Image: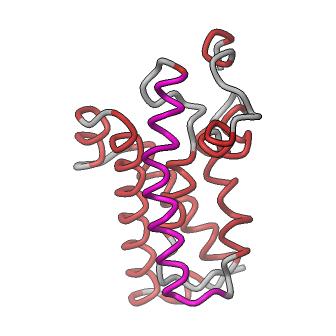
Amino acid sequence: MQAEYRARVSMKNPVHFLALGFGSGLIPVMPGTFGSLAAIPLLLACMYVSSVSFIALTLIFSVIGIYLCGKTADDMQVHDHGSIVWDEIAGMFVTFLFVPLSASTLLIGFLLFRAFDILKPWPIGVIDKRLHGGTGIMLDDILAGAMACGCLHLLMVLWPSSLSFL
């Protein structure tokens, strides 16, 4: 992260701390990937909660992410700076809606989410370019998570053995 932008955020500020993925977004290479990895301990902590609770947490993470990411982007004076990774955390939660967590599903879901987030197929790329503010920062990753989730569910139905290799 460039020093001028880093000076505008503080890890002591709870909004910045969360938006920067507990500090994972400050890693200078592949911050989005490290932000996505930061979601894994949270996902594992939710492994035994009910589906309703997991949906509620996913919605809460997504809605508060609009504020967290928007406020941090405003404070940094940069739209969707790479170090803002709460959107990746929320996107990972969307990826695993109704997916039983295992080493295999976590790995495949992570790879699918990162692929959709990086490649930004339609409509993700359009939203990423046209929608600004906290909503724009969050929505492209929510859609990437939804696409990854759909692919995981297809694998579970069409090729379940692909999810039990680990």
Task: Locate residue 73, reporting x and y percent.
Answer: 49, 28
Say whether residue 69 is magenta.
Answer: yes
The residue located at (65%, 59%) in the rendering is 39
Q: Residue at x 63, y 81 (%)?
A: 101
Going by the image, does 128 lie left or right of 148? left
Region in magenta: 49-75
**Position of residue 33 in the picture relative to residue 117 (left or right):** right
| 58 in magenta | yes
Give the percent coordinates (x, y) of residue 17: 69, 40
Residue 137, position in %: x, y?
A: 40, 40
- How many badges with numbers are in the image? 0
Look at the image and tell me in which quarter the N terminus lies.
Answer: top right
Residue 110: quadrant of the picture: bottom right
Q: Would you identify the image quadrant in which residue 159 lies? A: bottom left
Q: Name the foreground residue: 134 vs 24.
A: 134
Q: Is residue 16 above or below residue 158?
A: above
Q: Main secondary structure of the magenta part?
A: helix
Residue 157, placed above or below residue 131: below
Residue at 64% across / 46% down in the picture? 18
